[in-house]
Image (tube, grey):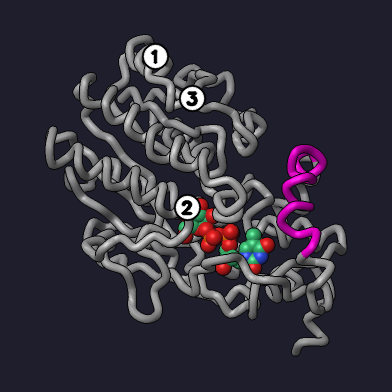
Amino acid sequence: MRILVTGGAGFIGSHLVRRLLADKDHRVVNLDALRYSGNLDNLTDVSNHPRYAFVHGDICDPKTVEKVFKDHDIEAVINCAAETHVDRSILDPSGFARTDVVGTAVLLEQARQAKVARFLQVSTDEVYGSVKEGWSKEEDALAPRSPYAASKAGGDLLVQSYTTTFNLPAVITRGSNTYGPNQYPEKFIPLFVTNAVDDQPLPLYGDGRYRRDWLSVFDHCAAIEHIFRRGEPGGIYNIGGGNERENLAVAELILKHLGKPMSLIRFVRDRPGHDRRYAVDCRRLHALGWRPTVSFEDGLRATVDWYRSHESWWRKIKSGEFRAYYEQVYGQRLNEGSRFDVQS
Ligand code: DAU
Protein backbone atom coordinates (compact mmCIF):
# COMPACT_ATOMS: atom_id res chain seq x y z
CA MET A 1 0.00 0.00 0.00
CA ARG A 2 1.22 3.51 -0.81
CA ILE A 3 0.74 5.41 2.44
CA LEU A 4 1.02 9.14 3.00
CA VAL A 5 2.23 9.86 6.55
CA THR A 6 1.94 13.54 7.36
CA GLY A 7 4.17 14.99 10.07
CA GLY A 8 6.49 12.02 9.61
CA ALA A 9 9.54 13.97 10.79
CA GLY A 10 8.00 14.57 14.21
CA PHE A 11 8.10 12.40 17.31
CA ILE A 12 5.27 9.89 16.78
CA GLY A 13 5.40 10.32 12.99
CA SER A 14 9.05 9.30 12.67
CA HIS A 15 8.58 6.16 14.76
CA LEU A 16 5.54 5.31 12.68
CA VAL A 17 7.37 5.80 9.36
CA ARG A 18 10.08 3.40 10.52
CA ARG A 19 7.53 0.86 11.69
CA LEU A 20 5.55 0.95 8.43
CA LEU A 21 8.70 0.56 6.33
CA ALA A 22 9.43 -2.70 8.14
CA ASP A 23 6.50 -4.16 6.17
CA LYS A 24 7.66 -4.96 2.63
CA ASP A 25 4.16 -4.30 1.28
CA HIS A 26 4.25 -0.62 2.20
CA ARG A 27 5.69 2.41 0.46
CA VAL A 28 5.75 5.49 2.68
CA VAL A 29 5.63 9.12 1.61
CA ASN A 30 6.37 11.55 4.42
CA LEU A 31 4.92 15.05 4.00
CA ASP A 32 6.26 17.40 6.65
CA ALA A 33 6.46 21.19 6.89
CA LEU A 34 9.57 20.89 9.11
CA ARG A 35 8.42 23.52 11.56
CA TYR A 36 10.11 23.79 14.93
CA SER A 37 9.54 20.19 16.06
CA GLY A 38 9.82 18.46 12.68
CA ASN A 39 13.34 17.09 12.51
CA LEU A 40 14.90 15.02 9.72
CA ASP A 41 17.57 13.89 12.19
CA ASN A 42 14.83 11.58 13.47
CA LEU A 43 14.90 9.64 10.19
CA THR A 44 18.55 9.50 9.10
CA ASP A 45 18.50 5.68 9.23
CA VAL A 46 15.71 5.42 6.63
CA SER A 47 16.36 8.50 4.49
CA ASN A 48 17.72 6.38 1.60
CA HIS A 49 15.26 3.53 1.99
CA PRO A 50 14.00 2.38 -1.45
CA ARG A 51 10.35 2.43 -0.33
CA TYR A 52 10.52 5.86 1.38
CA ALA A 53 10.13 9.38 0.00
CA PHE A 54 10.21 12.72 1.77
CA VAL A 55 8.28 15.78 0.59
CA HIS A 56 8.80 19.14 2.28
CA GLY A 57 5.41 20.83 2.44
CA ASP A 58 2.44 21.98 4.46
CA ILE A 59 -0.83 20.04 4.81
CA CYS A 60 -2.68 23.38 4.81
CA ASP A 61 -1.70 24.03 1.20
CA PRO A 62 -4.18 22.27 -1.14
CA LYS A 63 -1.85 22.47 -4.16
CA THR A 64 1.00 20.78 -2.33
CA VAL A 65 -1.29 18.07 -1.01
CA GLU A 66 -2.89 17.47 -4.41
CA LYS A 67 0.55 17.13 -6.02
CA VAL A 68 1.72 14.59 -3.44
CA PHE A 69 -1.37 12.48 -4.02
CA LYS A 70 -0.88 12.57 -7.80
CA ASP A 71 2.91 12.13 -7.87
CA HIS A 72 2.82 9.15 -5.51
CA ASP A 73 -0.56 7.64 -6.32
CA ILE A 74 -1.51 7.67 -2.64
CA GLU A 75 -3.86 4.90 -1.45
CA ALA A 76 -4.05 5.64 2.27
CA VAL A 77 -3.34 8.49 4.70
CA ILE A 78 -2.17 8.59 8.31
CA ASN A 79 -2.41 12.14 9.60
CA CYS A 80 0.17 12.75 12.31
CA ALA A 81 0.84 16.38 11.35
CA ALA A 82 -0.23 18.70 14.14
CA GLU A 83 0.68 21.50 16.47
CA THR A 84 0.72 19.53 19.71
CA HIS A 85 1.99 21.45 22.71
CA VAL A 86 -0.55 22.86 25.18
CA ASP A 87 1.77 25.57 26.54
CA ARG A 88 2.46 26.88 23.03
CA SER A 89 -1.28 26.92 22.32
CA ILE A 90 -1.69 29.17 25.35
CA LEU A 91 1.05 31.54 24.10
CA ASP A 92 -0.28 31.65 20.51
CA PRO A 93 -3.42 29.67 19.62
CA SER A 94 -3.69 30.77 15.97
CA GLY A 95 -1.35 28.22 14.37
CA PHE A 96 -3.20 25.40 16.13
CA ALA A 97 -6.54 26.02 14.40
CA ARG A 98 -4.69 26.34 11.11
CA THR A 99 -2.74 23.06 11.16
CA ASP A 100 -5.03 20.89 13.27
CA VAL A 101 -8.36 21.97 11.72
CA VAL A 102 -7.68 23.53 8.30
CA GLY A 103 -4.83 21.11 7.53
CA THR A 104 -7.04 18.13 8.37
CA ALA A 105 -9.81 19.58 6.16
CA VAL A 106 -7.41 19.90 3.21
CA LEU A 107 -6.21 16.31 3.62
CA LEU A 108 -9.73 14.96 3.96
CA GLU A 109 -10.89 16.65 0.79
CA GLN A 110 -7.96 15.31 -1.21
CA ALA A 111 -8.42 11.84 0.30
CA ARG A 112 -12.10 11.89 -0.68
CA GLN A 113 -11.31 12.84 -4.26
CA ALA A 114 -8.57 10.20 -4.50
CA LYS A 115 -10.98 7.59 -3.04
CA VAL A 116 -8.39 6.34 -0.57
CA ALA A 117 -8.80 2.92 1.00
CA ARG A 118 -8.05 4.25 4.47
CA PHE A 119 -7.70 7.55 6.34
CA LEU A 120 -6.37 7.36 9.89
CA GLN A 121 -6.54 10.48 12.03
CA VAL A 122 -4.15 10.58 14.97
CA SER A 123 -6.27 12.44 17.52
CA THR A 124 -5.76 12.62 21.29
CA ASP A 125 -7.38 11.76 24.61
CA GLU A 126 -7.31 15.50 25.38
CA VAL A 127 -10.45 15.97 23.28
CA TYR A 128 -12.46 14.53 26.22
CA GLY A 129 -11.24 17.24 28.57
CA SER A 130 -10.36 16.64 32.21
CA VAL A 131 -11.80 13.42 33.69
CA LYS A 132 -12.41 13.57 37.43
CA GLU A 133 -13.11 9.88 37.83
CA GLY A 134 -13.69 6.86 35.61
CA TRP A 135 -12.43 6.49 32.05
CA SER A 136 -13.48 8.28 28.86
CA LYS A 137 -15.29 6.12 26.32
CA GLU A 138 -15.16 6.75 22.57
CA GLU A 139 -18.82 7.82 22.46
CA ASP A 140 -18.43 10.37 25.29
CA ALA A 141 -19.07 14.01 24.42
CA LEU A 142 -15.96 15.99 23.55
CA ALA A 143 -15.13 18.73 26.05
CA PRO A 144 -11.71 20.14 25.11
CA ARG A 145 -10.38 22.89 27.36
CA SER A 146 -7.14 24.23 25.83
CA PRO A 147 -6.79 25.82 22.38
CA TYR A 148 -4.67 22.79 21.45
CA ALA A 149 -7.31 20.26 22.54
CA ALA A 150 -10.10 22.28 20.90
CA SER A 151 -8.20 22.35 17.61
CA LYS A 152 -7.64 18.60 17.74
CA ALA A 153 -11.34 18.12 18.54
CA GLY A 154 -12.15 20.20 15.44
CA GLY A 155 -10.02 17.92 13.24
CA ASP A 156 -11.49 14.83 14.90
CA LEU A 157 -15.08 16.01 14.21
CA LEU A 158 -14.26 16.87 10.61
CA VAL A 159 -13.02 13.31 10.06
CA GLN A 160 -16.25 11.96 11.57
CA SER A 161 -18.27 14.20 9.24
CA TYR A 162 -16.47 12.77 6.19
CA THR A 163 -17.31 9.23 7.29
CA THR A 164 -20.96 10.10 7.78
CA THR A 165 -21.43 12.31 4.73
CA PHE A 166 -19.08 10.82 2.17
CA ASN A 167 -18.50 7.28 3.45
CA LEU A 168 -14.78 7.97 3.69
CA PRO A 169 -13.25 4.81 5.23
CA ALA A 170 -11.70 6.72 8.11
CA VAL A 171 -10.65 5.66 11.60
CA ILE A 172 -9.68 7.89 14.52
CA THR A 173 -7.20 7.09 17.28
CA ARG A 174 -7.23 8.94 20.60
CA GLY A 175 -3.93 8.20 22.27
CA SER A 176 -2.85 9.08 25.79
CA ASN A 177 0.37 10.87 26.85
CA THR A 178 3.17 9.43 24.77
CA TYR A 179 6.86 9.30 25.68
CA GLY A 180 10.05 7.81 24.27
CA PRO A 181 13.14 8.63 22.19
CA ASN A 182 13.10 11.65 19.82
CA GLN A 183 10.40 13.59 21.67
CA TYR A 184 10.93 17.35 21.41
CA PRO A 185 12.13 18.54 24.81
CA GLU A 186 9.25 20.93 25.43
CA LYS A 187 7.15 18.00 26.69
CA PHE A 188 7.15 16.97 30.33
CA ILE A 189 9.34 13.84 30.28
CA PRO A 190 12.10 14.94 27.85
CA LEU A 191 12.17 18.42 29.42
CA PHE A 192 12.64 17.00 32.89
CA VAL A 193 15.21 14.41 31.77
CA THR A 194 17.36 16.90 29.86
CA ASN A 195 17.11 19.58 32.57
CA ALA A 196 18.10 17.04 35.20
CA VAL A 197 21.12 15.88 33.17
CA ASP A 198 22.29 19.51 33.30
CA ASP A 199 21.39 19.94 37.01
CA GLN A 200 18.78 22.51 36.02
CA PRO A 201 15.50 22.87 37.96
CA LEU A 202 12.48 20.76 36.94
CA PRO A 203 9.45 23.12 36.73
CA LEU A 204 6.48 21.16 38.10
CA TYR A 205 3.16 22.92 37.54
CA GLY A 206 0.82 23.56 40.48
CA ASP A 207 0.82 20.91 43.20
CA GLY A 208 2.33 18.26 40.89
CA ARG A 209 -0.64 15.95 41.56
CA TYR A 210 -2.00 16.07 38.00
CA ARG A 211 -2.42 12.63 36.48
CA ARG A 212 -1.63 11.28 33.04
CA ASP A 213 -1.70 7.79 31.51
CA TRP A 214 1.73 7.18 29.97
CA LEU A 215 2.02 5.30 26.68
CA SER A 216 5.33 4.25 25.11
CA VAL A 217 5.77 5.61 21.58
CA PHE A 218 6.52 2.04 20.45
CA ASP A 219 3.17 0.86 21.82
CA HIS A 220 1.42 3.93 20.41
CA CYS A 221 2.73 3.25 16.89
CA ALA A 222 1.96 -0.47 17.15
CA ALA A 223 -1.62 0.42 18.10
CA ILE A 224 -1.92 2.89 15.22
CA GLU A 225 -0.74 0.24 12.77
CA HIS A 226 -3.12 -2.33 14.25
CA ILE A 227 -6.08 0.05 13.95
CA PHE A 228 -4.97 1.08 10.44
CA ARG A 229 -5.18 -2.58 9.40
CA ARG A 230 -8.13 -3.82 11.42
CA GLY A 231 -10.21 -0.90 12.63
CA GLU A 232 -13.85 -0.68 11.57
CA PRO A 233 -14.41 2.07 8.98
CA GLY A 234 -15.84 4.99 10.92
CA GLY A 235 -14.43 3.55 14.16
CA ILE A 236 -12.88 5.58 16.96
CA TYR A 237 -10.33 3.90 19.21
CA ASN A 238 -8.83 5.05 22.50
CA ILE A 239 -5.21 4.05 23.05
CA GLY A 240 -3.95 4.07 26.62
CA GLY A 241 -0.80 2.73 28.20
CA GLY A 242 -2.49 1.62 31.43
CA ASN A 243 0.15 3.56 33.37
CA GLU A 244 -1.64 6.32 35.25
CA ARG A 245 0.81 8.30 37.38
CA GLU A 246 0.97 11.63 39.20
CA ASN A 247 3.44 14.09 37.66
CA LEU A 248 5.38 14.32 40.92
CA ALA A 249 5.90 10.54 40.93
CA VAL A 250 7.19 10.66 37.34
CA ALA A 251 9.60 13.49 38.21
CA GLU A 252 10.89 11.48 41.17
CA LEU A 253 11.43 8.39 38.99
CA ILE A 254 13.39 10.41 36.42
CA LEU A 255 15.66 11.83 39.13
CA LYS A 256 16.12 8.37 40.64
CA HIS A 257 17.17 6.88 37.29
CA LEU A 258 19.64 9.72 36.77
CA GLY A 259 20.94 9.65 40.35
CA LYS A 260 20.06 13.33 40.82
CA PRO A 261 18.68 15.01 43.97
CA MET A 262 14.94 15.59 44.50
CA SER A 263 15.81 19.20 45.34
CA LEU A 264 15.96 19.87 41.58
CA ILE A 265 12.15 19.83 41.58
CA ARG A 266 10.57 23.32 41.62
CA PHE A 267 6.86 23.86 42.21
CA VAL A 268 5.95 26.66 39.81
CA ARG A 269 2.85 28.67 38.86
CA ASP A 270 0.30 26.41 37.22
CA ARG A 271 -0.59 26.17 33.52
CA PRO A 272 -3.88 28.11 32.95
CA GLY A 273 -6.83 25.73 32.51
CA HIS A 274 -4.60 22.77 33.42
CA ASP A 275 -6.54 19.49 32.99
CA ARG A 276 -6.34 17.52 36.22
CA ARG A 277 -6.55 14.04 34.79
CA TYR A 278 -6.90 12.12 31.52
CA ALA A 279 -7.89 8.47 31.48
CA VAL A 280 -9.30 6.41 28.63
CA ASP A 281 -11.33 3.23 28.46
CA CYS A 282 -9.50 0.97 25.98
CA ARG A 283 -11.86 -2.00 25.88
CA ARG A 284 -12.76 -1.39 22.24
CA LEU A 285 -9.10 -1.59 21.19
CA HIS A 286 -8.49 -4.63 23.39
CA ALA A 287 -11.45 -6.35 21.69
CA LEU A 288 -9.74 -5.60 18.37
CA GLY A 289 -6.81 -7.68 19.61
CA TRP A 290 -4.24 -5.13 20.77
CA ARG A 291 -2.73 -4.41 24.20
CA PRO A 292 0.30 -2.38 25.30
CA THR A 293 3.50 -4.30 26.02
CA VAL A 294 5.90 -1.74 27.58
CA SER A 295 5.76 -1.24 31.36
CA PHE A 296 6.16 2.39 32.40
CA GLU A 297 9.19 1.70 34.60
CA ASP A 298 11.05 -0.11 31.77
CA GLY A 299 9.96 2.38 29.13
CA LEU A 300 10.95 5.38 31.23
CA ARG A 301 14.35 3.90 32.09
CA ALA A 302 15.04 3.18 28.38
CA THR A 303 13.93 6.72 27.51
CA VAL A 304 16.19 8.29 30.12
CA ASP A 305 19.07 6.16 28.77
CA TRP A 306 18.29 7.28 25.22
CA TYR A 307 18.48 10.98 26.15
CA ARG A 308 21.68 10.31 28.06
CA SER A 309 23.29 8.66 25.03
CA HIS A 310 21.93 11.13 22.43
CA GLU A 311 23.01 14.43 23.91
CA SER A 312 23.91 15.92 20.54
CA TRP A 313 20.31 15.35 19.33
CA TRP A 314 18.70 17.39 22.11
CA ARG A 315 21.49 19.90 22.76
CA LYS A 316 21.13 21.09 19.16
CA ILE A 317 17.43 21.68 19.79
CA LYS A 318 17.80 23.25 23.20
CA SER A 319 20.39 25.75 21.97
CA GLY A 320 18.16 27.08 19.18
CA GLU A 321 14.62 28.55 19.03
CA PHE A 322 13.85 26.64 22.20
CA ARG A 323 15.77 29.07 24.43
CA ALA A 324 13.44 31.99 23.78
CA TYR A 325 10.41 29.73 24.26
CA TYR A 326 11.81 28.38 27.53
CA GLU A 327 12.48 31.86 28.87
CA GLN A 328 8.95 32.97 27.95
CA VAL A 329 7.22 30.03 29.64
CA TYR A 330 9.52 29.38 32.58
CA GLY A 331 11.71 32.44 33.23
CA GLN A 332 9.35 34.21 35.62
CA ARG A 333 7.89 30.97 36.98
CA LEU A 334 11.28 29.65 38.06
CA ASN A 335 12.13 32.93 39.80
CA GLU A 336 8.97 32.67 41.91
CA GLY A 337 8.97 28.84 42.29
CA SER A 338 9.57 26.88 45.49
CA ARG A 339 11.91 23.95 45.99
CA PHE A 340 10.59 20.46 46.56
CA ASP A 341 12.35 20.06 49.92
CA VAL A 342 10.86 23.35 51.19
CA GLN A 343 7.31 22.47 50.17
CA SER A 344 7.31 18.82 51.29
O1 DAU B 1 -2.87 13.20 26.33
C1 DAU B 1 -2.24 13.28 25.09
C2 DAU B 1 -1.58 14.60 24.99
O2 DAU B 1 -0.50 14.60 25.88
C3 DAU B 1 -1.13 14.95 23.59
O3 DAU B 1 -2.25 15.06 22.77
C4 DAU B 1 -0.37 16.26 23.59
O4 DAU B 1 0.14 16.53 22.31
C5 DAU B 1 0.76 16.19 24.56
O5 DAU B 1 1.41 17.43 24.62
C6 DAU B 1 0.29 15.75 25.93
O6 DAU B 1 -0.40 16.82 26.62
P1 DAU B 1 -0.05 17.24 28.14
O7 DAU B 1 -0.35 18.66 28.33
O8 DAU B 1 -0.64 16.24 29.09
O9 DAU B 1 1.54 16.96 28.08
P2 DAU B 1 2.80 17.75 28.68
O10 DAU B 1 3.99 16.91 28.40
O11 DAU B 1 2.83 19.15 28.26
O12 DAU B 1 2.48 17.72 30.25
C7 DAU B 1 2.27 16.51 30.96
C8 DAU B 1 1.92 16.89 32.39
O13 DAU B 1 3.06 17.48 33.00
C9 DAU B 1 0.81 17.90 32.50
O14 DAU B 1 0.03 17.65 33.65
C10 DAU B 1 1.55 19.22 32.67
C11 DAU B 1 2.78 18.82 33.44
N1 DAU B 1 3.97 19.64 33.19
C12 DAU B 1 4.36 19.79 31.88
C13 DAU B 1 5.44 20.58 31.57
C14 DAU B 1 5.89 20.77 30.14
C15 DAU B 1 4.66 20.24 34.24
O15 DAU B 1 4.31 20.08 35.41
N2 DAU B 1 5.74 21.03 33.91
C16 DAU B 1 6.14 21.24 32.62
O16 DAU B 1 7.14 21.98 32.42
Location of ligand 1 given as a quarter of the image: bottom right
Question: Please, is residue 52 above or below residue 258 in the view?
Answer: above
Label 1 sits on residue: 63
Q: Earlier in the sequence, mark 3 or mark 1?
A: 3
Q: Earlier in the sequence, mark 2 or mark 3?
A: 3
Label 3 sits on residue: 58
Q: CA distance from mark 2 to mark 3?
A: 21 Å
Query: What is the number of the mark on residue 291?
Result: none
Q: Amino acid at mark 1?
A: Lys
Q: Quadrant of residue 37?
A: top right
Q: Earlier in the sequence, mark 1 or mark 2?
A: 1
Neighbours of disc 2 within 10 Å: few (<14), some (14-19), many (20+): many
Q: Secondary structure at mark 1?
A: helix
Label 2 sits on residue: 147
Residue at point 22%, 45% (across, down):
160
Residue at point 78%, 38% (across, down):
320
The percent position of residue 305, horizontal first and vertical second, equals 72, 56
